[in-house]
Image (cartoon, rainbow, N blue to C red):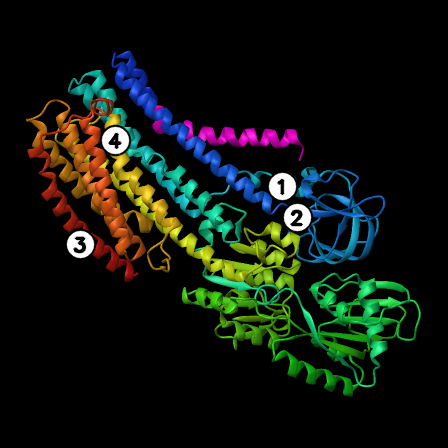
Amino acid sequence: MSRSEIFRQNVRTIRDIIFRNVFLLVNGVIFGVVVFLVAFGDVQEAVFLGMVTVLNMMIGTVQEIRAWRMLQKLEMVATPMVTTVDADNQEHLVAVGDVEKGDRIKLKLGDQVPCDGFLTVSHGLEVSEALITGESASFPKEKGDSVLGGDIVTAGLGVMEAEEAPAESRIAKMTRSIKKYSASFSPIQVALNKLMIYIGYLLVVAIIFSVVRGALVHELPTDIVKGVGALTSIISPQGLLVIVTLIFAFGATNLYKRNVLMQELNAMEKIARIKNLCLDKTGTLTENGLSVNEMILAPGFEKDAAESAVAAYILGSHDSSQTMSAIERSLRNDFTGEIDEELSFSSARKFGGVHLKNGTDKIILAGAPGILLERLEKEEEKLWLREIIDRVTKMGKRIVFFAKAEGETLPHDLSAVHLHAIAAFVLNNDLRDGVADTIKFFQDRGVIVRIISGDHIETVKAVAAAAGVKNTDLAIKGTDMENWSELNYLERVKDYTIFARVKPEQKEKLIEALKKDGFTAMVGDGANDALAIKKADLGIAMFDGAAATRQIASVVLVKNSFADLPEGVGLSDRIIENIEICSSVFFNQVFVGFFFFLFLSLLNYSLPFTPLNITFINYFTVGLPCSLLFYWIVRPSTPHRIPDDRSFLRKVLPFPLSSAIPQAIIAMFAFYVSLNHAAPTGPSCMVVLSFIVTGFIFFMFTPWLYTGSITATQRKQMIILAVLEVVSIFALVKIPIFAMFYNIKPPEFGRAILLLPLGLMYWALQFFVAKLLTARQRGL
C-alpha cells in the first residue's frame, strides 16, 4: 500500500472515530438545548453546558484515537514478511507491504502467497485456494502457472514473480473492508449497541412527553429546555461505549506484554468464552524443534546406502519442514546423483517421493509408516516395521519411514506400488514447558480439550496423556471418519477426545461440528492448521509457525508458548467482569433517572435538575468508581472466577433494574423533604446527594455480585474512595465558583443528614437483593 493510500485510510479512520463521538443523539439534544438557552437569554448556563459537552466529546475522541494507535502498533508486530530474490539470487526479508510489481518472491511450505503472480521456479509446489474459493483441496503448480494472493503453500518450494502489488490482489480487495478499525464488534459491544438503540427510543418518547407536559402547565421555556437537557443527560449512558472500547484496547496492550498478541479487538472477549479447545500436537503441546533419537536400518540394508537414499529424497523433494530438517542434520552422507522428478510431502497425501535419473531403485518414498506399511513386498519387513510402530508410538515419539521402489515414473498414489524398506527414523520433541499446567487450567474451567493431529494414534494418545488431557482413550483415526456424513460429524464428534491421522479438510469439518456444541478455539502452527483456525470461533497461532496460519489467526502467541494462554484468559476474565460492573453502574443511573422522572411526572412535577447537575452526579456515581475498576483490572485482588454462560445483558440488567426503583423512591423522599423549605435550587441539591449516596452504595455491591467475592483490600479501597468523594463533594458545594458552575446550593445540614438513615436502609435492601440474585445465579 502506498503512503498516500495509507494516509487516506488513516484520515478515513479518524473521521469515523470523530463521527462516532460527536454525532450522537445525546450530543445533538444537548447542543439544541444550548442554542435554546442562548435564545432565551440564559447565556451562562448555555456556556457552561456547552463547555462540558465539548470537553466530553474531545476526551472521548482523543481516547479512542489513542486506542486505535495502540492497536496499530500491535499490528506492526505481526506484519507479514516475505523472502524476495534479487538478480544475484540473494535473498532478502521484506514486509509484504513493500513488495512491488516484478519482484521475485520465494515460496515455501506454510507461506501465504502475498499477491497475484506466476511461477518462475517450481519444485513440487502445491497450493490450497481455500481462503478464496472455500475448497480445501491442494493443487500442483508448475513453472509458468499463475498463483493468487491468499493461496497457501501446502507442499514443495517455488519462486514467483509478482504481477501487481499485494494491495491490488483479489484477496486484499476481498478483505480490505474487514481490516478497518472498529469494523468488528465484540458480543458485548453488539449487546450494548442494541440496548442503546432502545434507550434512544425511550429518550425520544420521554422528551416529547416532557415538552408537551411543560407547555400544558405553562412552564417557562427556559425551564422546559433545561429539563430536556437534564433528561437527556440522565437517561443516556454517555461514554459507556467509549469506555468499553478503551478497556478492550488497554487489555490488548497488556496481553501483548504477556506475549499474547490480539489481531482483532473482539478476540479480547472471545478468549474467555472458550468451551471446546482443539490443539494440534506438534508445535503446540510439544516443542516445534525435532531431534532424531535413532535411525533404524531395514533388515539387510547398509547405513551408507540408506543415508544416501534419504539425502536424495531431502534434496529432491525440497521439503523444508522441521521433520526433514532434523533428519538432514543427523545424516553423514550426501547424495551426489541427479533427480529426475519430485513429489513433495503434503499433509493430505501423507507421503512424498523423488525419482532418480540413475540407479537400480530409482524411486525413494518417505512418509507415515502406517501409510506405506501395507505396500511393503516382504512379510519380514512388514513385521519389522510393525514392531517399531508398536514400540515407539506408545512412547509418544514420531516415526518417518523411507522406502524404495522400481519404476520409470513417480507414483502419485500407492495402489500399485511394491516397496522395499530402507530405514525408519525415530524423532522426539518434548512437551513444552508449562503445557500440563495449562491443560489443567482449562479443564478446571470446564473446557473440553481435544487433540487433532496427523500423527499416529498411539503417539498422539501418549503425548496427550503426558500433558494431562482427560479421556485419551476416546480416540479415532481419520481413516475411520472418511465416510462420515455431515450429520455423522454433528452426532459423533463430541464422543472423542483424540483425532489422529487427520487430513486438513477433516480438521475443518471437525471444528465446524464442534462449534455447534459450544464456543470453539483452535490452536496450531502449521499450514495444515490454517483452514481449521479460519473456521474456529477463535483461531490461535504460534508466532514462529506457518505465515499463513499466523495471518489468519485472531490471537498469536508471540513466544510460541501455549502456556502463555492462561494469563491471557485470566486478564480477559477480569476485563469482562469489570465491564459488567461498569455497565451495571451506568445502567443503574439510567434506570434510576427514568423511574424518578416517571414518578415526578405521575405527580405532576418536573425534573429538579439542570444538565450540569447530572454532570456533577456522574462524577461521583460513574466516573470515580469506574476509575477504581481500571485499577482492579491491572492489580486484581479477587480469586479467579470461572465465568458463567449467560449472555451479557442477562447478567448485567437484573441488578440495576431491581435496585433502581428503591433508589428513585429515596430520591422522591429527598425531593419532598426540601420542596417547601428551600430556595429554588435547594431541592435539586438534596436529590443530587440522594443519587450520589445510593449510587455509591449500589457500586459497593457490584464486585461481590459479578465476581462472586470481595476482598478486604477491595473494601479498604472502596472506603478510601468514599472518603475521597465526601471530601470532594463538600469542597465543590462550599467553593462558590464550583457551586455556581454546577448550579448547586448546599442544603441545610439537618435535612441532608436524613439521607444517612435512608442510605443505611438502602444498604440493607441491596444486601438482600444481591444475596437473592447470587443464589439465583448459582442455581442457573
Q: Which of marks 3 and 4 is nearer the N terminus?
A: 4
Q: What residue lies at 29% left-to-right and 29% top-to-bottom?
A: 232
Amino acid type at mark 3: Phe
Majority secondary structure of magenta residues: helix
Provide the secondary structure element on which disc 1 rests. Answer: helix
| Callout 2–callout 1 Cβ contact below 8 Å | yes
In three-dimensional space, the C-alpha distance between marks 3 and 4, rounded to whole angstroms, equals 29 Å
Magenta segment: 1-29
- The image shows residue 565 at horizontal and vertical percentages of 49, 58
Nearer the viewer's eye, disc 1 or disc 4?
A: 4
Q: Name the residue under label 4.
A: 616
415 sits left or right of 509 in the view: right
Amino acid type at mark 1: Met
185 sits left or right of 390 in the view: left
Provide the secondary structure element on which disc 2 rests. Answer: helix
| Callout 3–callout 4 Cβ contact below 8 Å | no
Amino acid type at mark 2: Ile
Q: Mark 2 points at which residue?
A: 132
- Say which quarter of the image contains residue 126: bottom right
Decide which of 39, 288 is in the foreground and name it: 288
Per the rendering, the mark at residue 490 is none
| Callout 1–callout 3 Cβ contact below 8 Å | no
- The image shows residue 544 at horizontal and vertical percentages of 63, 56
Total numbered badges shown on the rendered structure: 4
Q: Which of marks 2 and 3 is nearer the N terminus?
A: 2
Q: Quadrant of the C terminus?
A: bottom left
